[in-house]
Amino acid sequence: MSVNMAVDLGGIAMRNPVNTASGTFGNGVQFEGFYDVGATLGAITCKGVAAQPWDGNPAPRLAELPSAIMNSVGLQNPGVAGFVERYGAYLQGLRERGCAVICQIAGHSLEEYARATELFEELAPWASGFEVNISCPNIAAGGAAMGATPAAAAEVMRTVRPLTSRPVLVKMAPHDVAEIGRALQAEGADALSLINTIPAMALDVRTRRSRLARPTAGLSGPAIHAIAVRMVWECAQAVDLPLCGIGGIASWEDAAEMILAGATAVSVGTANLTDPLAAAHVAEGLERWAAEQGVDSITELVGAAEL
């Protein structure tokens, strides 16, 4: 039986529910040698980009742990203009091939978010929508995440929303997802992406120093998957928005869990670094699973967990 795998992620039409998490898939072109990205995935989310170039954090910025990776890359990026110059032609072609292109917006202040959004609006007509990363530190407020509280998250959304008519997703930090999700919905978010990496620490017991250049970093990979599923479920109970489930998805079964918990779409992240075919395998497996479940559309399985 043929299953309709198409989903609508807050106004972003996807041929199937499989997306890629920002920062783990380059900007798509890096994976074309492994499979036809445009013909296989529902969407890709590009690496986070700010209005002006960021250098990122000093090395070492990555550390491998059992079932996880820690990163402190610091959203190194070439700025919107540099990003569009380097990848714009490819991304326009990718969208023409049927794969949605979601550009992630980063900023250290409300002004930076606004300027990045304005630049994307001007320079990236091929973008299907935008994902606003509210886990960036607010430098002016001492380094707390821009979306650390419902009020702060709402303020970012109020800043960005009037600047674009395209779909706006919000990449959420792994805390207070129900309360912050409601605040974002009230300010016009079209969809929510969750969760971002979990703050963690790893020490070298011989040198007694951090294994990265900074004391803490973001934990991702299979080790956080069950936490992410729980948070997607919590958020799905609190908002009437489509969700993109992110966190430790390494197989179609992991992705199916997210969908049953309430995710309309899923993003494959860290798994891309260990298996470049991971997202393609997830897409193939989800279609088989949906057929086995006897549904006409994958959307019938969104939030269908029997709890």
Image (spheres, grey):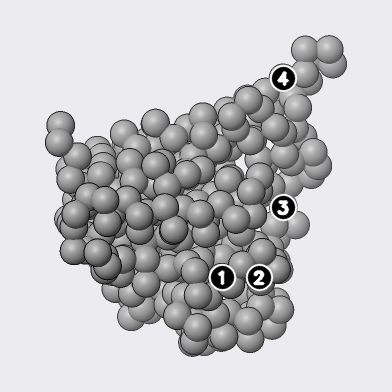
Disc 4 versus disc 1: distance between alpha carbons? Answer: 38 Å
Amino acid type, label 1 = Val
The image position of residue 232, as x and y in percent, is 31, 42
- Nearest to the eye among marks 4 and 2: give it: 2
Residue 32: assigned label: 2
Sequence-first disc among 3 and 4: 3
Q: Label 4 is placed on what type of residue?
A: Leu
Query: Residue reaching furthest right?
Result: 207
Give the Cα distance between marks 3 and 4: 21 Å
Which residue in the structure is indicated by mark 1? 37
Callout 3: SS: loop
- Sequence-first tag of 1 and 2: 2
Circle 3: residue type:
Gly
**Looking at the image, is mark 2 or mark 3 earlier in the sequence?**
2
Q: Kindly identify the residue that appears in the image at 77 percent across and 18 percent down.
A: 204
Q: Considering depth in this image, is 94 or 47 the residue closer to the camera?
A: 94
Question: Disc 3 marks which residue?
Answer: 56
Q: Is residue 160 above or below residue 231?
A: below
Q: Secondary structure at mark 1?
A: helix
